[in-house]
Image (tube, rainbow, N blue to C red):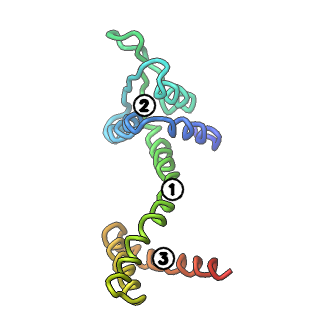
């Protein structure tokens, strides 16, 4: 069953309230689904995992199973292989929601580390450009596939031009 946008938003809302440890259970289960048809997950009744996983059963991503014999208060869910792709996309989307915060943090923290220090060392605007270009190049080489380097550089150039246009307005 394909999840509707409102169902995805509901899942994301619940996931934002969960701890990294809770989310890591799903991430680990997704890894296991690469080799297995399903994965059994156990939680306690009333937990955030229980609420999330119960909602996932309505999407047929999971199914409820009987409690553990050793702990009747346990809740057992079976994560199905068919859920791997949509759940993986959901977790990635949840992580991407943090990008605006990350950008704000970089804008706040990084410029004071570069500009003032280059100027204090007697650097010129050209030296500052060289430092920034070096950072862009090392970032590109370290984290971006080689076939995407041109696209990355073009995007950096276009964003710099866009920001300059906004500043001039």
Q: In percent of the image, x 43 and y 36: which residue is there?
A: 19
Give the residue number, with chain letter if any, for mark 1: 101
Image quadrant occupied by the N terminus? top right
**In-front residue for pair 14/27:** 14
Location of residue 79 in the rendering, given as x and y in whole percent from the top left corner? 42, 31
Extreme-right residue of the structure: 169
**In-front residue for pair 64/27:** 27
Q: Secondary structure at mark 1?
A: helix
Task: Using a 10 Å C-alpha cutoff, classify the residue at mark 1 as few (fewer than 14 neighbours), some (14 to 19) or many (20 or more).
Answer: few
Give the residue number, with chain letter if any, for mark 3: 156
Give the residue number, with chain letter if any, for mark 2: 79
Q: In percent of the image, x 64 and y 82: which residue is there?
A: 168
Location of residue 25 in the rendering, given as x and y in whole percent from the top left corner? 37, 34
Mark 3 or mark 2: whose residue is earlier in sequence: 2
Q: Which mark is residue 2?
A: none
Query: Please, is residue 168 above or below residue 111 in the view?
Result: below
């Amino acid at each position: 069953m394909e999840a509707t946008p409102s169902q995805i938003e509901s899942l994301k809302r619940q996931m934002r309230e969960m701890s990294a440890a809770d989310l890591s259970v799903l991430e680990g289960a997704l890894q296991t689904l690469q080799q297995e048809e399903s994965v059994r997950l156990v939680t306690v009744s009333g937990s955030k995992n229980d609420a999330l996983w119960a909602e996932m059963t309505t999407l047929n991503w999971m199914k409820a199973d009987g409690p553990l014999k050793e702990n009747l208060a346990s809740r057992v869910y079976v994560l199905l292989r068919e859920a791997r792709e949509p759940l993986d996309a959901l977790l990635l989307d949840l992580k991407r929601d943090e990008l605006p915060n990350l950008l704000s943090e970089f804008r706040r923290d990084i410029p004071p580390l570069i500009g003032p220090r280059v100027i204090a060392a007697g650097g010129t605007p050209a030296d500052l450009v060289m430092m920034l270009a070096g950072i862009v190049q090392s970032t590109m080489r370290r984290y971006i596939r080689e076939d995407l380097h041109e696209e990355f550089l073009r995007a950096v150039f276009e964003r710099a031009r866009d920001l300059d246009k906004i500043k001039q307005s």
